[in-house]
Amino acid sequence: MSTAKSPQRSDIVPAPRPADTERQTAAGKVLWHFTMSLDGFVAGPGHAMDWMTGFSFRPGLVEEYVATTGAVLGGRDGFDAFPDAGSVYGGAWQGPVFVLTHHPDDAPPAPGVTFLDCDVAEAVRIGLEAAGGKNLEVLSPTIGRQLLERGLLDEIDLHIVPVLLGDGIRLYDNPGGVPVRLGFLNGDDHAAAVDVRCRPVR
């Protein structure tokens, strides 16, 4: 029989709360970047984005990504919903936008947008070259999933906001797939759970 005593409340030292992530750097990374609802959606039905208003982010966050992004890679569904390439980061960012599509011929021309019909790895190569040493931001759940499966993603950057959408486009939707283990880049314990506590806003 073990003689080890059970830990008492006074013996339990709470784990330190993970710090915020380091500031983003322009290091030629392939970055899957989204603001996400608490239940895992990055867009509402039909790619709706009107749910993203009314949240606060740390000061300088948008400017940080504007400064470190060299090019953007997106998918056709997202482009069809928001064809204005000049609206990335509210228009604060200007640069090359690539849209990966199997049907580039019927895509309406848009300033600053290049339509690609190629393998996803080739699209990443083209995007990184255009980024000129800065990061290539992937703004497509479908393309991000493909890159993750191919080992072509460097980071996943998520800003989780306190809202439950219940429907829409999920960040990662892979029914029947196997779990993908990740490591957090905030704090020393990359496998530490992140606690979120919310209450409904009446």
Image: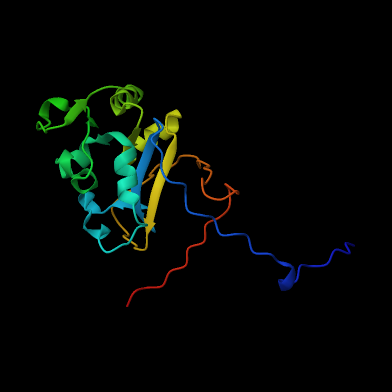
Q: Is residue 201 above or below residue 41?
A: below
Residue at 60%, 49% (x, y): give it. Answer: 189
Residue 64 in sight: yes
Residue 106 at x, y percent in the picture: 11, 29
Examine the rendered structure and indicate whether residue 179 appears above or below residue 161. above
Q: Position of residue 116 (x, y in %)?
A: 22, 25
Q: Is residue 5 placed above or below 67 in the rendered structure?
A: below
Point out the image quarter for the N terminus.
bottom right
Number of labelled discs? 0
Residue 60: image location, x then y, percent: 34, 52
Q: Return the x and y of residue 73 as percentages of the image width and height.
A: 28, 33
Q: Residue at x 46, y 29 (%)?
A: 151
Q: Which quarter of the rendering shows the C terminus?
A: bottom left
Closest to the observer: 161 or 19? 19
| Nearer to us in this view, 180 or 19 | 19
Q: Quadrant of residue 51?
A: bottom left
Residue farthest to the bottom, as pictured: 202
Left or right, 44 with respect to 24, comes to left
Q: Is residue 83 left or right of residue 54?
A: left
Residue drawn 44% across and 38% down? 155
- Does residue 139 show up? no
Quarter residue 126 falls in: top left
Chosen colour scheme: rainbow
The residue drawn where x is 30% and y is 25% is: 123
Horizontal side of residue 187 vs 54, given as left or right? right
